[in-house]
Amino acid sequence: MASYGFEANGCEDEVKLGTWFRGWEFQMRLGIVGCTLLGLVVALTTVGPAAHVVGAGSSILLVTDSANTTDPFGPYLGEVLRAEGFPTFATADLASITGPSLATYAVVILGPASAISPSLVSTLTAYVQGGGKLIAMHPPAALASLFGVTPVGSTTNEGYMAIIGGGLGGNFNTTPLQVHAPADNYTLSGATAVAKLYSSFAAATPYPAVTLMANGQGQAMLWAYDLAQSVVYTRQSQPSRVGLHAGTNGYRTTDLFAGYVDLNDVPIPQADEQQRLLAKAVLTMSAAPMPHLWYFPQNAGTVLVLTGDAHGNPTSYYTNELTSIEKFGGHITFYAAQASQPSASDVASWTQAGQAMGIHPYANQVTLPDGSQVPPSTTSCGTSDGNG
């Protein structure tokens, strides 16, 4: 398998092109590229999210349905693509799709659609059978035969998906991961399951979560759920949970996730793993090498972002931690509650050295004399123990 990633190489006008696993690499010169990965990213992504227009040579077309008011998350797939290192893609509305408009793209990603006309089914089928690669998120049942599946007529809500090891799922965590979007239940009718659907962490269903089908000269991948919606709700929780309170003193952002995030999956970046599967599918299904940016500068395998809460700690706690961090050339941001330490001069000195200090806010429910309650205000800060 050959999949690719860009990396800026020092301060030379040079970019490395390497495999997904960075097992081999060769170099190509791009005379106008800046000397850092950030410069390269900025050069390629200086466009608004709602109007992502690219020139000739784009390999990916993202198709979204502006008429889909039930699931409006299709455009967020663009953010998923950018996060996964694909800044150069084109977008189109479902209503504008024609056979010629699809033919120039190696991979077409179809966001959730409210409905698909018979003529559009024929257009998409012809694209795939002619050699195109189609990936669809929670597609209408009318497209089932194109993907080699048969609708059961039911859904799995707040379920899980488990990537099947080997093949496209090779090198992924196979632990069941939460899906915060409805998933349609299908049986396989020629397709191969890439991921299985679970109704709970321990209970597998007989249905697939992700499938892959060879159809004519092309391939069609089905996601039984909308990845974009699930990613958003995994990271931000669902709107219906706004105002819920976990029962501890004060209101915190974690209230939105208490009882919502499966603690079995806490060690796993669930949204990221599912995004990675989409990215690997795009790279693997494309017949030609596709421009793909690596996630971190200098081809680093890992980046650690250090932050720390401070609840009225003495200055010695700060200095001890800073000594150990600075020994490795690192930096940290402290979020401090109200306290007499550290002093303003200490903070100024640490900031000068590249460290950062922020305010640790706390918001509490306020009960008025008449018994009514005022929603928590995030503008109030706690006392030295963070609970005042």
Image (cartoon, rainbow, N blue to C red):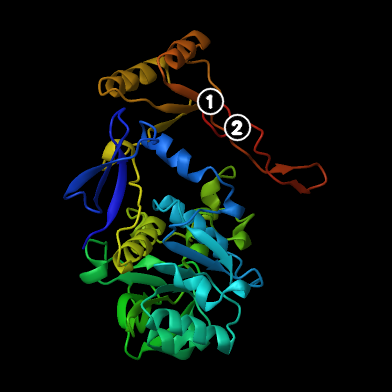
Q: How far apart are marks 1 and 2 (CA)?
A: 8 Å
**Residue under the point 45% across and 68% down:** 104
Q: Amino acid under label 2? A: Gly
Camera-side residue: 314 or 302?
A: 302
**Residue under the point 30% across and 63% down:** 288
Residue 300 percent coordinates (x, y): 27, 39
Residue found at the far right of this picture: 370
Q: Residue 384 carries which label?
A: 1
Q: Amino acid under label 1? A: Ser
Location of residue 159 with respect to 49 vertically, above or below: below
Q: Which mark is residue 17?
A: none
> Please, what secondary structure does the residue beneath circle 2 have?
loop
Residue 135 percent coordinates (x, y): 42, 72
Location of residue 194 with respect to 207 vertically, above or below: above
Residue matched to label 2: 388
Q: Is residue 353 visible?
A: yes
Location of residue 344 with respect to 300 vertically, above or below: above
**Residue under the point 46% across and 16% down:** 351
Q: How many marks?
A: 2
Residue 172 percent coordinates (x, y): 26, 62
Q: Is residue 169 left or right of residue 387?
A: left
Check whether the beta carbons of the residues at disc 1 and disc 2 lie within 8 A of each other.
Answer: yes
> Please, what secondary structure does the residue beneath circle 1 have?
loop
Camera-side residue: 283 or 31?
A: 31
